[in-house]
Image (cartoon, rainbow, N blue to C red):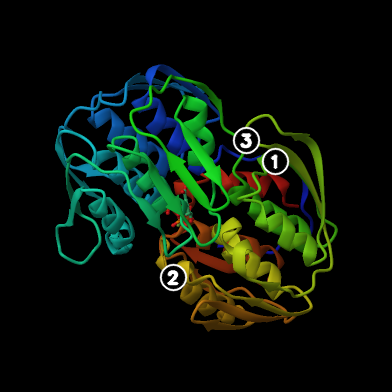
Amino acid sequence: MIFQPVKQMKGEVTIPGDKSISHRAVMFGSLADGTTEVTNFLQGADCLSTIDAFRKMGIEIENTQEKILIHGRGLHGLKAPSSILDMGNSGTTTRLISGILAGQAFESTLTGDASIQKRPMRRIMEPLSMMGGSIISINGNDCAPLRITGAPLHGIHYHSRVASAQVKSAVLLAGLYADGETLVTEPSLSRNHTEIMLRCFGADLTVENKTAKVCPEPRLQGQKIVVPGDISSAAYFIAAGLLVPGAEILIKNVGINPTRDGILKVAREMGGNITLLNENYDGEPTADLLVKHSRLHGIVIEGDLIPTLIDELPVINVMAACAEGTTVIRNAAELKVKESNRIDVMVRYLSAMGCDITGTDDGMIIVGGRPLHGTEVDSHLDHRIAMSFAIASLIAKGETKIKGSDAVNISYPDFYKDLRRLSR
Ligand code: SPQ
């Protein structure tokens, strides 16, 4: 797809539902008794992979586009899948479902696309094995395809080396089937949607500092879930609003959970003009974001902030490329094991657009302020890369061609439609 620079960005956009929350709603609804109703569910390819996997395990799920109805069969109601479970491109589905499958009374095999088959699974295989789970990498490379043979599980206290919501959630979900309490301590707090939603379904789950504790064998009860807009998808319009001269964008109903709102903190610290309107703190907090064009300056982004904006770092790179001065990003080595190596890919193509950017072992250094020019970019089938370069193209000189632009279907199928509607 070919992109041209824009003269103006103005208007209102309603962001689709949060991907992390949509996945969890289907999973927990499947394990609950009764029906779970989900509105504003993200109809992206990743969340549809989650629906497909649970349907294959005997869960009836109605998807009317307007809402999803999950007819849960209780904690022990899943059936042995009729065929291999296909995770598509979704790391969240693969890792969280592994925690659930480890405690079932049947064997299952999971696989996914070329990207999923390269993403590290040792991080979940290790704690699940410590709990007594039997989970093997069929090709012996610690990646999918995985074979999981359900087994009796023991509660453990797992100290995770990475701040990862997927690792934390896999262990907590396995903990629902264990013979005692399961605790997970992480080095920095990662997104806490599992903790919030499992508690809302009726699990006995408590959190103290960076440790979450779950008790086994809860009786989960079907819920009504309204999924907030995904702040990770809103991030592209936040960047567009800040970077395009004269821009003003109202982004409606965005999730602002403090374990996800690092992009707001960083954008403001860089000098970004963002106003929160209609804040709502019932359950997962939400707000409308009014974003106005701003002169940005470079900052240091590191430490506990990183897990709260990990998926937004590619588009933050684009913001840093346009900011005055130097932006240093540290402690973000996790970027190397996402859908693509997001350090390498961002450094390669932002450099090709004229940006002064250097990759490091755990981040990047960007000396901002050089004008960007269009070039040919490959998304490496990574939705966040495609969307980040679509935003860079708005302020680059000349034409930008993005190969693999349809990767946006993973998390934001209408992204280009919304972008075009706001562009002048
Ligand atoms: O699901 P997937 O492919 O891992 O998606 C990504 C993304 O960019 O959308 C990461 F590539 O988001 C992850 C996120 O990085 C979603 C997620 C979750 O829902 O629990 C947690 C984060 O991953 P991790 O490895 O830090 O737990």
- The residue under label 1 is 13
| Direction from residue 145 to residue 224 in the image, left or right | right
Tell me if 270 is positioned left or right of 397 in this view.
right
Q: Residue 330: where, in percent of width, then height?
A: 58, 75
Quick one: label 2 or label 1, which is nearer the N terminus?
A: 1
Disc 2, disc 1: CB below 8 Å? Answer: no
Q: Nearer the viewer, residue 176 or 118?
A: 176
- Residue type at tag 3: Glu
Mark 2 is on which residue type? Lys
SS state under label 1: strand
Residue nearest the observer in this picture, 57 or 169: 169
Instruction: Kindly tell me whether mark 1's CB lies below 8 Å from ligand 1.
Output: no
Q: Is residue 60 above or below residue 299?
A: above
Residue 260 in view of the camera: yes
Residue 79, numbered circle: none
Q: Which residue is mark 2?
A: 336
Q: Count neighbours of disc 2 (C-alpha within 10 A) and say few if under 14, some if 14 to 19, many if 20 or more.
A: some
**Seen in the image, is 148 located left or right of residue 74?**
left
Which residue position is annotated with label 3? Answer: 284
Q: Position of residue 290 (x, y in %)?
A: 80, 46
Q: Badge 1 local density, few (<14 within 10 Å), some, or many (20+)?
A: some
**Which residue reaches farthest top?**
34
Q: Residue at x 62, y 35 (%)?
A: 284
Q: Quadrant of residue 138?
A: bottom left
Q: Mark 3 falls on what kind of element?
A: loop
For label 2, being within 8 Å of ligand 1 is answered no
Q: CA distance from mark 3 to mark 2?
A: 29 Å
The amino acid pointed to by label 1 is Val
x 21%, y 35%: residue? 104
Q: Earlier in the sequence, mark 1 or mark 3?
A: 1
Mark 1 or mark 3, whichever is nearer to me? 3
Where is residue 170 shown, x and y percent of the image?
36, 46
